[in-house]
Amino acid sequence: MKKLQYLFMSLAAMFLATPAFAQSAVNGGSAAGQWVPLAAGLGMALAAGLCGLAQGKATASATEALARNPGARPGIFIFLILGLAFIESLALFTFVIIFLQVKA
Amino acid sequence: MPKQLLFTKFLNGHLAAPVTALLEAVHVHPKHPQAPISNAFAMEILVFLVLIAYFLIVRFTLSVEKPGAFQHLAEMTNGFVEDQGHQIIGHGSERFVTYLTALFLFILLSNLMGLIPGLESPTADVVVPLGMALMTFLYYHFHGIRANGAAYIKQFLGPVWWLYPLLFPIEVISHFARVLSLTVRLYANMFAGDLLTLAFFSLVPIGIPLIFLGLHLGVAVIQAYVFMLLATIYLSLAVAHDH
């Protein structure tokens, strides 16, 4: 059991390493350039995940408020859309920055 | 030569020389003198023509007894924007309805254009949303000054005098950040939608990208609404009187 664990751990480390080696030739071969795709992916994943969490929280509160007071629908709708747009734009800022950095 | 859509090619074929001459006159040197008109600009012209045609049709078929389909559509859009304006701005929102409706229709049509093969969204190019955001910025400041006069400056200052030097730069920066966020929100949404469809199209060329086209349809409508909503809110903040 212990040996299998070591085997998988070393395999995982090797699989992680291969893309890094392969990338170094693509991005001009600079030492920093090889981390750009990894950083872009991780950054976008973080932004998208946290944006999803926040939007979920906002939507949950809005539906709860709507269930308690269906009469307040128009006001809640405006603030929900507005909040979602603002939260979403944060993820989109990340996307734009990644797009600018990776292309340059 | 850049890649051109059919309509861009048509425009460049007929108008390349005068447009290049005009740009040279204001000391702008287009990258390709044979094709100075970009795809985004050609698509904007197309949206402009379609909207003008739509408004003309509505104007000439106006009738009290027998309202046509176009009139119903126009009344619905105008009523929707008027409702929003009344809810957010309250009294005196009528004068903004024309601008907001035009903005809404222009963005909606621009966004939806990306769904048609052979055309692309002008809003997926960053300069187009920037233009609309700057226009909105100037518009709400103009109306803020018109409604409040010199007292408009109070909106940029804090509640007490010793906070003024601290809050003034913050408020100015936050107003410019509105332009940035309006621009980036619309541009990135449209651009990311196109990119997403393209990415899935390269993975599975049949069927699956349709789902994302449907998603993009929803995003296009919501973003046009959000842009209009934010313009309304900025207007409401600008014209509000401090009591």
Image (cartoon, rainbow, N blue to C red):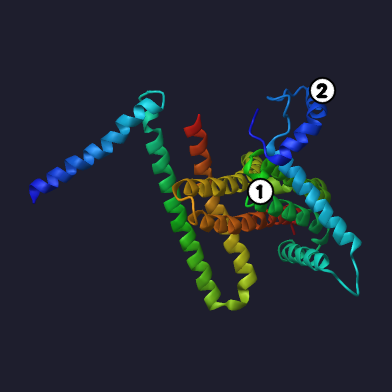
Determine the residue positioned at 60% across, 57% down: B217
Total labels: the figure holds: 2
Expressed as whole percent of the image width and height from the top left, the position of residue A99 reads 51, 37
Locate residue B62 relative to residue A92 in the image: left or right.
right
Q: Nearer the viewer, residue B88 or A12?
A: A12
Q: Mark 2 is on which residue type?
A: Ala
Residue B138 seen by the camera:
no
Q: Residue at x 80, y 56 (%)?
A: B96
Picture disc at residue B221: none
Which residue is the site of mark 1? Answer: B160
Q: Is residue A86 visible?
A: yes
**Of callouts 2 and 1, which one flags the residue occurring earlier in the amino acid sequence?**
2
Quick one: label 2, few (<14), some, or many (20+) residues within 10 Å?
A: few
Q: Where residue B63 sits in the image (x, y, percent)?
A: 91, 69
The residue labelled by disc 2 is B25
| SS at badge 1 | loop
Pointer 1 local density, CA inside 10 Å: few below 14, some 14–19, many at least 20: few
- The three-letter amino acid code for the residue at tag 1 is Val
Q: Residue lying farthest front?
A: B206
Spot occupied by residue B158 in the image (x, y as percentages of width and height): 66, 47
- The reply to whether label 2 and label 1 mark residues of one chain is yes
Quarter-of-image position of residue B218: bottom right
Q: Which of B184 and B2 lies nearest the eye of the viewer?
A: B2
Q: Name the mark nearer the viewer: 2 or 1.
A: 2
Q: Secondary structure at mark 2?
A: helix
In screen coordinates, is A101 left or right of B241? Answer: left
Disc 2 from disc 1: Cα separation: 51 Å
| Position of residue B18 measured from the top left corner of the image (x, y, whole percent) | 83, 28
The residue shown at (22%, 39%) is A13
Q: Is residue A31 left or right of residue B183?
A: left
**Chain under callout 1:** B
The relative height of residue A70 versus residue B90 in the rendered view (above or below) is below
